[in-house]
Structure formats: C-alpha cells, structure tokens
Amino acid sequence: MKKLVLILFLLLMVVSSWAQKSVPQVMVMEIKDEIDPRMLRYVKLAFEHAEKIKADYIIIDMDTYGGVLTDAKEIVDVVMDSKKPVWVYINSDAASAGALISIACDSIYMSPGASIGAATVVEGDGKAAPDKYQSYMRSIMRSTAEENHRDPRIAEGMVDERVVIDSIKQAGKVITFTTTEAIANGYCEAKVESIEEILKRNKVENYELHRFKLGASEKIIAFFLNPFISGILILVILGGIYFELQTPGVGFPLFAAITALVLYLVPYYLNGLAEYWEIIALFIGILLLAAEVFVIPGFGIAGIAGIILTLVSLVLIMLNNDFFNFEFVPLGDIVKASVAAVGGVTGGMLLLIFGGAKIVETKAFKKISLNESQKSADGFTVNSNAQLLLNKKGVAHTVLRPSGKILIEGEVYDAFTRGEYIEKGEQVEIIGTEGVTLRVKRV
C-alpha cells in the first residue's frame, strides 16, 4: 500500500511539473523613449531576462521617434539573434530607428492610427545627415527587411526620398505607412487593439505574462548615462579634489570626488561605451596634472598635456567611437559630450575661483574647522624665536614650492617663499615671519 501511495505521489509530481512547464511564458518589454545608450542597455537586460525565465515569446511594446543609429543597430542585432519569436506592437509611432527595430522583429502588429517609417538619418538640428549616414541606414534597412522576407525596396524608400516605387512612392518623399498601408504592403501582420489580442491571434492560450522593468540599480545606472548628469559629476570630481587639497585631512571632499568618479565611469563602462584605454587615458591625465602641481615647478608641458588628455578622455568615454573612429557617431552626440566635459571642467574652475573663499563661511565647513581666534589680548602669544631668526641664513631642507621646510643651525622650521621655487639644499635667507612660519628668499 505504501509503495502504491509513493508511486502515485511521484506521478502527481511529474504531471504537475510537466503542466507547469507547458504554460507558455510571454515577456513584454517597452521601447517608448529615445534610442540611446540607456535604451540599448535596457533592451540587452530585457533579452537576458527573457532567457532567464525561458520565455517562449517576446513582445516589444513600441512608441518612439527614433534616436542614435549605432545604438539602434546594436538593438537590431540583439533582436535578430534571439532564438525565440520576437513580435512588435506599434501602438503609436515607429519612426526612424524605431522603424528599423520593428522591421527586425519576426512579426509586426499595429494599433489603429499607428505609423511606421520616416527613417531618414537626421542630425541634432533636424537636418538630414550626410549621405554616408543615409547610405549606411539604407543598407541596414534593406538587409534587415530581406532577412525577414519583407520588400527591401520599401525599407530603402523609408530612408531615401529619391527611391521611386510604382503605386507606393514617388520621388521627393520618404515612406511612412499607416496601419492599413503597412498591412497592404507586407509591413504589418494585422491591426490589433492590445497585446492580448496579438497572443489570441497566434493561438497562445493559458500563458503567463511577464512585464520587464528595470531594477533600482539599473535605473540609477540609466540616470547617470545622461550627459548633463555627467557634466555635474565632472564638476564634483574637480571641486572635491581642490577642496581636499585646501583642507587636507577632512576627507569628505575627497570622498565626494571618488564617489563622483565611480558614478561617472561605471555606467559608461557597463554600457560598453567606456573602453579600458579611455579610462587609462583619464587617469594618466589626472596624474600628469597632479605631477605638475606637486612635483614639477611652474606650469608647462605636463600640465597642458594633463588638461588635454583629461578633457579628451572624458569626451571619448561618453561616445560610442571605435578608437577615434567617429564615422557613425552623430555630430549631436559629439557636441553633447564635449559640452558636458568642457562645461564640467569650466564649472569646476569657476567653483574653485568664486566658491573657494565662501565655502569657509558655510555652516557645514564650520562644523569641521576651528572657529575660535587665539588673540594676544586673551593671553596667547606667538613663539618669539621666529623673530630672532630674521636675516639669518640656512638651507632648504625640502623643496619649497612655495612652502616647505628649512634647516637653520641644526633645527628644522616651516617656511615659505614669495612664490619662487627653491630646490632642496639651496641656501635661503629669512626675510620675515608669519606666525611661526618663516618667509624666506633664495640667497
């Protein structure tokens, strides 16, 4: 009897497991924003999630006016590499890069009043991009349409206004199909009202629907991929380093700078924009600037090279270039990245110039600084030995640039110059005092 019960229990478990696995898994993701690095990362994560949950069908809920061509091409590659059916539901617009992504899908469904097409590549000001971009887009549109058994001439006509197709398109305009026109020309399977209707038409029943959403950490990464935010982070990096140098030992400004640097680099690295050599170039630029400030006297080649290398690497990190190959990087993206980098550096410099003096007056700074004055009227006095050293000579115990230490009669004293650079071992003369610090000049 026990054996019979055990066998029945095992059979029940097998049947239950089989029934659970037999339920179709459907994942829905959205492309309802500009096609850019943030959208590319979202799409990659969505398809990884689809693989993780073993989705049987993937549906893209589409409503976009397009975006960056290079990011759209990578999304197309992800879609076409999928081993599961990918359907797109255009519930409003699939223009430009959105049309390209839609054509890459196995099936296209459109809502009443939706449109697909107008895939001419444009620059930031809305004008048509140079022909090399148009040629690249025409090529991608044709090959993608052919792969999914759609008329490649129509796909090309969505990009090139010169293309003429009898009864469909005349010269001087690019193709933009309504839902009815798209169905008539093989660029839409059917007019539908919802995703559920798409599944019903394809006889997908008793399914489990998953709507992919970014997690909190991924939303943060997407937020920091914005060039405007990148410019603010650059400002925080520079300001944090400066104020740490002005108030050594406080720690908070340096912590803020390091945090901002991590938030700047990590999102671009995870999204495949920041290459190893670009990050290395950035750190070399920072090291050159540090060497100019702390090691090399004056301001020369190292400082200039550091500024140039830092600025260039900050810009390159934000761009999808192939080792200085900007052939398919939109001019608008280059301008945005340059403005963010230069704006961040300029803002940092202005902050140092105008905010440096005022920061000591803030409540936050007063909490970590000594605010009491030790006045002579209260019985405080300065060590008078400094006054006795006036006009005496000694040697630089360390490099003075312009502050450092000097050696007089076997004793080490803090000293500073009037701005000149003095090497270790050079003779100096005491010409004044400031508190307990000696003001010196080269003999």
Image (cartoon, rainbow, N blue to C red):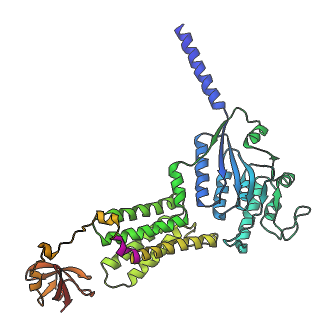
Question: Residue lying farthest front?
Answer: 377
Q: Main secondary structure of the magenta part?
A: helix
Q: Quadrant of residue 53?
A: top right
Question: Residue lying farthest right?
Answer: 167
Q: Is residue 302 above or below residue 236?
A: below
Residue 105 image position (x, y, % from top left): 72, 51
Question: Residue lying farthest bottom?
Answer: 443
Quadrant location of the N terminus in the rendered image = top right
Q: Residue at x 30, y 78 (%)?
A: 295
Magenta stretch? 354-360
Q: Nearer the viewer, residue 303 or 136?
A: 303
Q: Is residue 358 left or right of residue 323?
A: left
Count of marks placed on residues: 0
Residue 422 image position (x, y, % from top left): 23, 86
Residue 354 image position (x, y, % from top left): 40, 77
Q: Can residue 331 be seen by looking at this rendering?
A: yes
Asked whether 408 falls inside the magenta stretch, the response is no
